[in-house]
Image (cartoon, rainbow, N blue to C red):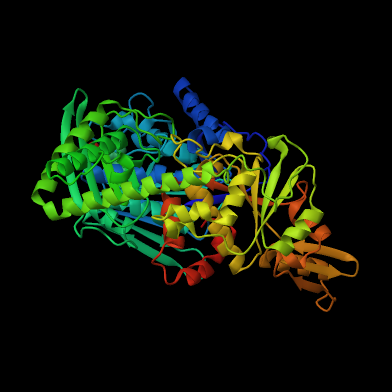
Amino acid sequence: MGLIVAVVRMFDIPPALSFNVGKRRFPTGTFAGWELFMEETYDASNIQVLEGLEAVRKRPGMYLGDPHDGSALHHCIWEVVDNSVDEHLAGHTNLIEISLHEDGSLSVRDYGRGIPVDTHEEYGISAAEVIMTKLHAGGKFDNSSYKVSGGLHGVGVSAVNAVSEWMEMTIHRDGKTYFQRYEAGVPVEALRVTGDSEATGTKISFKPDRSIFTEVVDFNYEEVDTRVSETAFLNAGLKITIADERGEEPHASEHLYEGGLSEYVTQLNERREVLHSDVIQITGEKEIEKGTVEVELALQWSDAFSESIRCYTNIIRNKDGGTHMSGLRTALTSSVNSYAKKKNLLKGDSLSGDDVREGLAAVVSVKHPDPSFSSQTKDKLVSSEVTGIVQTIVYDKLGEFFEENPSVAKLIVEKALLASKAREAARKARDLTRRKGVLEGGGLPGKLADCQSRDPSECEVYLVEGDSAGGSAKTGRDRRIQAILPLRGKILNVERQKHNAARVFQNQEIQTIIRALGAGVGNNIEEEGAFDSTKLRYSKIIIMCDADIDGAHIRTLMLTFLWRFMRPAIEDGHVYIAQPPLYQLTKGRVSRYVYSDEERDEVMSELQGGNPNAKIGVQRYKGLGEMNPEQLWETTMNPQTRTMLKVTVKDAEDSDRLFEILMGEDVPDRRSFIETHAKEVTNLDI
Ligand code: 0RA
């Protein structure tokens, strides 16, 4: 979810992986105890196939994403699942079963037609084998309407095969079951019939190769589950099951949403007070030269502050939006404004897009015969014709909806008017504080112990919880490059002041942070004095809090403030979280700091060296204040030895929702929420 913090430690890059382009040997039987093989002679096309797969093994990052942080690992799943989703879109399966096996492998079963098994003319091997071994082979068999979904990079299942220790394909088709196994992408046998079958469909199992995926080697159930539910929302009527057979307590889930996108929006608004009970649904299509562009949309306003708009093209999420997003935005602004004008609901200026979209949750899904994206990762749709198509459809249909539902329309307009007033008030409050010189120009805050260097690239500032820890940090730091800003108690929860920004700018601790960082405040770059990370006085903003629940809460408050008022600091990777140790273990004169309970147990048995009675001292640090300056430096602040977490934004919209939930008004169980998520908060997958 949301913000992911990556450990800032250089990973070892594995040495270039060698790939053995061996000749293929097909077992043909046994004779007098000898196994007989037919050994293949190469022709140009085989070599091409193997070279393609070798390229994937050598540079998995180019095809599948980062092999170290888990993204390539999980991308493998979607590459395989998407083929089955395509089979659903073609109208041949309503069930896909995903299993996460104990041995680290994963399988995907669908009940579609089964991958074709007939011999491929060009290559002289089964079509199935071509799909499994030739990069981009999928498209070869498609008729133009067939392939709507498709992997992130569209590399196909062969890329997954290449990075798998083994892959097995079972096909049920034409009354028979076919089977073939591959190792490191290379078939170890020809496709063969293993029996009769009444069923149809395909099962693909694979085990990611641990020599390629070295850091993150296990599939993450939560991640699989989240993405699967997204796929199920976008394919109303398709059931996708997940069975996690690993661990002591295997678990399973099932995703089937008959309501499709509108159920998706209902889920997005789950914890919010909605403005109108029914989700608004819009569909439409338009012929273009290459075929038909289909647009499907669901939207609903709530009392939330932020907007959540999710965009998809051919079932693939475009996290940076694109032309469908801009078409939608334009249409929203103009249809709400023209309705408001027509009904005389507007007193002054037109409503801005931000005002209209405040509290909106929407999902827009476009199906396009030949979409273009800004990058390999398809994060942004750039097909220009889509803007106008979405705009026209949304403008027309939303206008109709407003006419038919005047009471809902009025609520939406009133909400936008309120947003507009709050925005104006916030701007005034900020300008007033600025004019008083409190936010800039007024010199550095007295509490700040600045560093000597004036080169921001080497400077860092510690935002420290509490005066006593601040004192230790001031003494222990490297004063040439490290500045310390002690903050007293809990900083204001800005999420609760969303309609009262004046309070935010009047808050002492917040003014102090703004002045110390010296880079302005506010996420709207069009406004004067908005936050600009190029002006930061320090390239690293390090949040240092106690390793307890209160510390976790304060850290979240600080992150919430940075997110709502200095977002580029997070987006541009300037924000870090210090990791103070949890325990000090001592044996005689040997002393070790450890940062987690697991590490404590490990180091404990290491120090005991097989003698369970050995005397080991265990000191638990409850707060930063318990450490003397030398200890604080040694364990947490020394740039040579410390480990920090870097706050990175995986998904801005998820982060928005997260802060809304964590810090919003209507969370009676906020404390317990943080408590139950404390571990995640610590490792910052909050
Ligand atoms: C190409 C053509 C046809 C089906 C498939 C591929 C296919 C691929 C996968 C991958 C996983 N499950 C799949 N199911 C089907 C159509 C073949 C025909 O016309 O019968």
Residue 154: image location, x then y, percent: 39, 34
In the rendered view, would you say 27 is above or below 381? below
In the rendered view, would you say 484 is above or below 621? above
Identify which residue is drawn at 50% across, 49% down. 563
Is residue 369 at least partly visible in the picture?
Answer: no
Report the front residue among 375 and 199: 375
Hey, which residue is sitting farthest left in the picture? 404
Report the front residue among 184 and 219: 219
Identify which residue is drawn at 51% across, 61% down. 102
Is residue 414 at least partly visible in the picture?
Answer: yes
Residue 412: image location, x then y, percent: 22, 51
In the rendered view, would you say 401 is above or below 613? above
Q: Is residue 44 left or right of residue 356?
A: right
Report the front residue among 648 and 264: 648
Q: Is residue 441 left or right of residue 294?
A: right
Hey, which residue is sitting farthest bottom in the picture? 613
Identify which residue is drawn at 47% across, 40% down. 161
Hey, which residue is sitting farthest right in the picture? 589
In the rendered view, would you say 34 is above or below 627? above
Residue 233: image location, x then y, percent: 29, 52
Q: Is residue 340 left or right of residue 418?
A: left
Q: Quadrant of residue 623?
A: bottom right
Residue 385: image location, x then y, percent: 25, 26
Hey, which residue is sitting farthest top in the picture? 44
Report the front residue among 176 and 431: 431
Q: Quadrant of residue 252?
A: bottom left
Q: How many marks?
A: 0
- For ligand 1, the image quadrant comes to top left
